[in-house]
């Protein structure tokens, strides 16, 4: 079955007695039993929604099938998914991560886990990251493309190094989704998502996912999910299931828009540089074509003069100045004061997140309207 078909129909269905095409929202906290030897009134195995719920289960099947995973787990947010994942490790464990992470992930590592004794080290590119992987490395955590610099890491190479060291490879696939990149096929053990972005796709809900290979790992994560209790609600599960039906359509249109905007911006004299992996001038363009099946619709750009930043943010009309990404609406973000505000200044500047950098999540509006809006805002 092709990807587009799986997005709509899925490969596995939770049994629907009514024949409803849309998975119903099973808004029930608990499920009744016929007797001691029956789990759930229909023998379905449902007990209590923190543990599992039919709407969430259908969504977990969908994510697992799209990522080529054995199992997937749905959480209340991307950060809840990462926090649950970190329960696999212990204080003292060494985790190697890509530099230039989403600010919230960095904050969790730096301000919540490091003080407890977890040891994080950051590699700026594939080679630097691989050089940090040693026999006592428990996990490698990679974001590719990175947020907001759009740097790429070579998943295949890192997977080989992680395997040789016996470390788990975790890839944050939020920016591309399985439609444009399937990290498990490239050797990763865990894929994570902020489903608040492209998977939900409409800027109307928050969610997070872990998709994993291997039954032993899946069992541990299922236990952590039910025990720590950050599973996605039935209503939010319904919204993400609905969003996924149009994932390929939205991504194709948003990518087409992003390509056009990246080109226009790179020709504008007030723009110093554009970071988009679909531009042949991107230093990892070749890697992009080798490990991704599309370039996505996220880009960042630097203006020549920091004074242009407040002007652009004030003047945009159609494009909204707001945090987040991956929805139908185009959003512009100022990483310095928003998504990456908690990264220490020296660290932030060395990554390239300065007062001239803006990030654009290109939506599915008309490319012409978006270009007109950006061009008038830049002036
Ligand atoms: C790449 C990436 N990973 C993880 C997260 C966290 O996800 P959430 O906001 O759903 O908690 C985000 C949020 O912006 C993100 O951009």
Image: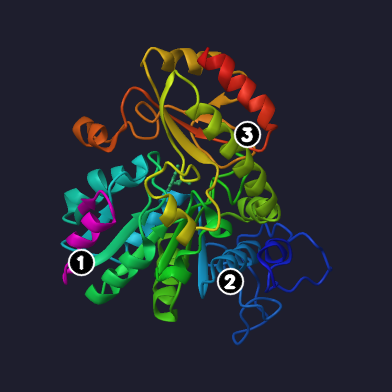
Asked if residue 122 is among those painted magenta in the image, a careful observer would answer: yes
Q: Is residue 25 above or below residue 305?
A: below
From the image, which quarter does the N terminus lie in? bottom right
Q: Which residue is mark 2?
A: 47
Q: Which residue is mark 1?
A: 137
Left or right relative to 194: residue 198: right
Residue count near mark 2 (Cα–Cα under 10 Å), binned few <14, some 14–19, many ≥20: some
Asked if residue 307 is among those painted magenta in the image, a careful observer would answer: no
Q: Which residue is mark 3?
A: 329
Q: In this rendered view, identify the residue nearer to me: 145 or 38.
A: 145
Residue count near mark 3 (Cα–Cα under 10 Å), binned few <14, some 14–19, many ≥20: some
Q: In this rendered view, identify the residue nearer to me: 216 or 100.
A: 100
In this figure, which colouring scheme has been used for the structure?
rainbow
Dot placed on the residue nearer the N-terminal end, 3 or 1: 1
Distance from the alpha carbon under mark 3 to that under mark 1: 40 Å
Q: Marks 1 and 2: CB-CB under 8 Å?
A: no
Residue count near mark 1 (Cα–Cα under 10 Å), binned few <14, some 14–19, many ≥20: some
Q: Residue at x 28, y 51 (%)?
A: 125
Element under disc 1: strand
Distance from the alpha carbon under mark 1 to that under mark 2: 38 Å
Residue 9 x %, y %: 73, 66
Element under disc 3: loop
Left or right relative to 47: residue 336: left
Quarter-wise, where is residue 186 in the image? bottom left
Instruction: Report the disc number at residue 61.
Output: none
The part of the chain drawn in magenta is 121-136
């Amino acid at each position: 079955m092709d990807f587009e078909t799986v997005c709509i129909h899925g490969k596995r269905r939770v049994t629907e007695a009514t024949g409803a095409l849309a998975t119903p929202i099973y808004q029930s906290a608990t499920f009744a039993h016929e007797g001691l030897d029956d789990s759930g009134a229909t023998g379905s195995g449902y007990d209590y929604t923190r543990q599992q719920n039919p709407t969430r289960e259908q969504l977990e099947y969908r994510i697992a099938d799209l990522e080529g995973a054995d199992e997937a787990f749905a959480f209340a947010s991307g950060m809840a998914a990462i926090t649950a994942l970190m329960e696999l490790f212990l204080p003292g464990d060494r985790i190697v991560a890509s530099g230039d992470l989403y600010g919230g992930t960095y904050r969790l590592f730096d301000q919540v886990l490091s003080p407890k004794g977890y040891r994080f080290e950051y590699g700026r590119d594939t080679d630097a990251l691989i050089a940090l992987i040693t026999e006592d490395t428990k996990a490698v955590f990679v974001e590719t493309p990175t947020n907001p610099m759009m740097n790429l890491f070579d998943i295949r190479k890192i997977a080989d190094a992680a395997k040789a060291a016996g470390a788990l490879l975790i890839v944050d696939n939020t920016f591309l989704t399985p439609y444009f990149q399937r990290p498990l096929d490239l050797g990763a053990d865990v894929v994570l998502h902020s489903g608040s972005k492209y998977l939900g796709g409409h800027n109307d809900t928050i969610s997070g996912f872990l998709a994993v290979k291997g039954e032993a790992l899946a069992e541990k994560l299922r236990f952590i999910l039910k025990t720590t209790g950050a599973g996605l609600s039935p209503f939010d599960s319904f919204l993400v299931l609905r969003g996924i039906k149009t994932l390929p359509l939205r991504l194709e249109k948003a990518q087409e828009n992003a390509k056009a905007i990246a080109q226009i911006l790179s020709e504008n004299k007030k723009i110093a540089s554009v970071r988009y992996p679909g531009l042949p001038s991107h230093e990892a363009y070749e890697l992009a074509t080798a490990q991704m099946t599309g370039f996505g619709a996220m880009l960042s750009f630097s203006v020549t003069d920091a004074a242009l930043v407040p002007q652009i943010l004030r003047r945009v009309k159609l494009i909204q100045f707001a945090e987040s990404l991956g929805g139908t609406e185009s959003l512009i973000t100022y990483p310095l004061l928003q998504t990456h505000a908690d990264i220490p200044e020296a660290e932030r500047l060395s990554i390239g997140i300065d007062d001239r950098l803006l990030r654009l999540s290109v939506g599915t509006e008309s490319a012409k309207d978006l270009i007109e809006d950006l061009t008038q805002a830049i002036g």
